[in-house]
Amino acid sequence: MQISFVSRPTMDSGTLVVGTPEGGAFAGIAAEMDRLSGGALKRAVGASRFAGKLGQTIELVAPAGIKASRILLMGLGKPPAFDGAAAERVGAGAVGKVFASGEKEIHFAVELPKAAKLTPPALAAHLALGARLRTYTFNRYRTRHREEYETSLTLIAIATREAAAARRAFAVMDAVADGVFLARDLVNEPPNVLSPVEFAQRVKALAKVGLGVTVLGEAEMKKLGMGALLGVGQGSERESQLVVMEWKGARAKKEAPVAFVGKGVCFDSGGLSLKTGAGMMGMKGDMGGAAAVTGAMLALATRKARVNVVGVIGLVENMPDGMAQRPDDVVTSMSGQTIEVLNTDAEGRLVLADALWYAQQKFKPKFVVDLATLTGAIVTSLGHEHAGLFSNDDRLADRITAAGRAAGEPVWRLPLGDAYDKALKSKIADMKNIGGPAAGSITAAQFLRRFVEATPWAHLDIAGVAWQDGEHKPLTPGWATGWGVRILNRLVADHYEK
């Protein structure tokens, strides 16, 4: 599918998208289309509840006098509130309306309202980004009626007076969309296909964009003392992996990197602390943190980010066979700290414990951010709108919060503290892996805090935002959302590139 920027809109083929603000009269292209259609747009508005609110649409088969196949009128909302997110929603909304219609071309002739912080080319690029994100599909396992789930679109064209500048701005966003799509693909893959080894092989393929990729197997991790991570995967026939991705984009190649760490439980049965049948469905997505880190690394490398970055993902499968980890086992982490495993379904924190420690000891990063579908408790707290944020550093937490707001991936900071840490006290080891029924997300983060030394650190619990079982959001048409790629990219772009 081609996405192009043109200085003048094409009005003689495909679907023509025009826009109007909330409470405003038709102007520009919209007024011209209404004139050419003999007032058909105004009559359609008069016969509906369309008021120009953001997200509202009216679709008309093009009347005589207009060569396009159909006209799509998009509400732009109130002009003072229009921003990049609004432009993305317009793009996604228009593509969503024609996605499965058989249409081959969609032409945006939308005169976007001025935005306080964005130039017209940037707004046009955001519109294109929203359109592209809405085109995502995952149909590789469908053998029948594929046409119901796929688009026939071959061209998305956006008209803007500064087409060259919009094209340059979109090139960066397009790289981020590549990362989002990769993360979605990884989360959507069935667990019989995406084993830890297969995941690692797919990451190796990213060397083509300039990433350095190193894979550690179980023997290598055993030598490093990663007893926490290895304990999780010992019940599976599939070998656990630790994958390291490096991007050296800074002018000073030896400059300390920023580090991202992802939980990659490719399937989580709960282990011997077995989940219910219903609770096990969807647990192919328990590697959403690793998927986000992988997608972010692809985005940064593709757009040639001027920063050194390392991504570390721990890949395991949590299964209940005769070799599986037992409740009451004690494991020794790479840090040397011992952990009493009271619940084998609290396994993600064990994976992250060793991955976090490895990232700090090996790379001495400026900061480390981990992402994990860690707790169901975070869904109880924040639903499916925000990820939970925990941090030992206020500046890093503030930057992540701002990046999430700008990227459309919002976070909400929750507390840490000694009172929560006491809940992890074990009778026989340095700590236990669960803290009791109260404040489950907080005590899980407090557990991770024990594997962070002086490094600025943040933990993002993305269990509520990595996939969606209910109503799909405009920019995320599938089950997997790819959450995390955009916030990490924005964090780097805003504060760490030189």
Image (tube, rainbow, N blue to C red):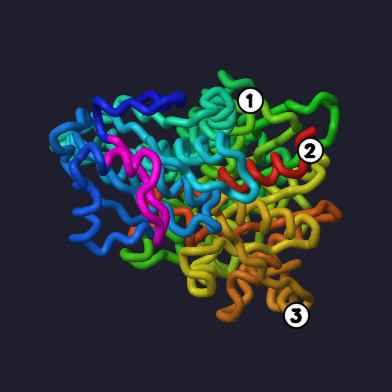
265 vs 203, nearest the viewer: 203
Query: Distance between the Cα atoms at labels 3 and 1?
Result: 42 Å
Magenta span? 16-33
Q: Secondary structure at mark 1?
A: loop
The mark found on residue 211 in the picture is 1
The residue mark sitting in front, 3 or 1, is 1
Residue on which the image places disc 2: 362
Crowd band around label 2 with a 10 angstrom C-alpha radius: few (<14), some (14–19), many (20+):
few
User: Which quadrant would residue 52 be assigned to in this image?
Assistant: bottom left
Tell whether position 269 is magenta.
Answer: no
Lateral position of residue 26 relative to residue 123, left or right = left
Give the number of marks.
3
Query: Distance between the Cα atoms at labels 2 and 1?
Result: 17 Å
User: Which quadrant would residue 9 be assigned to in this image?
Assistant: top left
Residue on which the image places disc 3: 419
The mark found on residue 393 in the picture is none
Amino acid carrying mark 2 in the image: Lys
Instruction: Tell me the residue at 33%/43% (across/down).
Output: 30
Q: Secondary structure at mark 3?
A: helix
Image coordinates of residue 109 in percent, x first then y, are 38, 36
Instruction: Tell me the residue at 38%/24% (across/down).
Output: 2
